[in-house]
Amino acid sequence: MIRAAACFVVLMAMMACQSPLSRTTPKAATPQSVVVQPGDVPGMQRCSSSGPVGQVLSDERTHGSPAYDMNATEWEQWKRQGAVAAYFAVYGQTAADCAAAGDSSTGAPTGGLMVGLVVEFQDAKGAARNFQRESTLMGLGPRDIRFIELAGGTTTIGPATGLGADSVVGSAVIAGADYFVAMWQSSRFQSEFMGYDMAYADADSAVIEMNRRILQA
C-alpha cells in the first residue's frame, strides 16, 4: 500500500511538470529578435555598427558621423508616429566590408553586405500607417526601391512578395553587383532589408526568416 502511494505521488509530480500552466511562456518578439540573425546567411559576420537604434545614434554622435543629424531627426519623427523600439543590423563577409558600411571607409564593399532594420510600433495599425508614409530611417527607405527601378531592375508589390499586403521587394544587377531590397509591414513591426553583392536566394531567404520570426511571435 505504501509503495502504491509513493508511485501515485511520483505520477502526480510528473503530470504537474507537463501541465500547460507550468510551461514556459514564449518570449515576445522584439526588433532585435526579429532582425537578421547570424544563422540567416552563413559566412557573414556581424559588424560593430549593429545595435539598438538609440545606441547606434549615440555612437554616431560620439564619432561625429555626418549622418547623425539626419538619422536622429528621422528617428524622432518615427517615434512621434508610434515607434517604440528599433534595431539596426549590419553583416559583411569581411571586416573590410563592415568598414565600408560605416564611416571608417569611403570605399565600396569588396564582398557581400546585408543591412536589416526592424522597428516596433505600439500596435499593428500604427505600423501600417507609418509604412504608408514611405519615410526613411538609418538610410533605408523607399528611395532604395526607386534606385532599383531606375536601374532597370524588377519589383514585386503586395501579396505576391509573400510578405503581406504592405510589402515591396526589388532586385537588380548594377555594375556587376547584385542588389536586393525588401520593405514590409507585418503585425506591429516595420522591416527593411538591403543586400549587396549576395545571391538573390540568400537575400530572399534572410528576409523570409525575418518575417517567419514575426509570424511565430
Image (tube, rainbow, N blue to C red):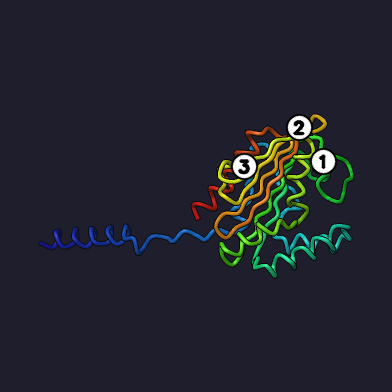
- The first of marks 3 and 2 along the sequence is 2
Q: Nearer the viewer, mark 2 or mark 1?
A: 2
Q: Is residue 140 above or below residue 45?
A: below
> What amino acid is at disc 3?
Ala
Q: Nearer the viewer, mark 1 or mark 3?
A: 3
In the displayed structure image, the side of residue 60 where residue 195 appears, left or right: left
In the picture of the structure, the residue carrying the numbered disc 1 is 96
Determine whether the residue tagged by mark 1 lies in a helix, strand or loop: helix
Q: Residues within 10 Å of mark 3 (few under 14, many from 20)?
A: many
Task: Please identify the quarter of the rendering in which residue 159 is found.
Answer: top right
Task: Please identify the quarter of the rendering in which residue 69 is found.
Answer: bottom right
Determine whether the residue tagged by mark 2 lies in a helix, strand or loop: strand
> What amino acid is at disc 1?
Ala
Res 198 label: none
Q: Residue furthest left?
A: 1
In the picture of the structure, the residue carrying the numbered disc 2 is 173
> What amino acid is at disc 2?
Val
In the picture of the structure, the residue carrying the numbered disc 3 is 206
Q: Residue furthest top?
A: 176
Measured as percent of width and height from the top left, residue 174 is found at 80, 33
- The first of marks 1 and 3 along the sequence is 1
Measured as percent of width and height from the top left, residue 48 is found at 76, 51
Determine whether the residue tagged by mark 3 lies in a helix, strand or loop: helix
Q: Is residue 182 above or below residue 71?
A: above
Marks 2 and 1, Cα distance to the nearest angstrom? 22 Å
- The first of marks 2 and 1 along the sequence is 1
Q: Residues within 10 Å of mark 1 (few under 14, many from 20)?
A: some
Task: Please identify the quarter of the rendering in which residue 156 is found.
Answer: top right
Q: Tell me what residue is drawn at x 76 percent, y 56 percent.
A: 138
In the foreground, 173 or 84: 173
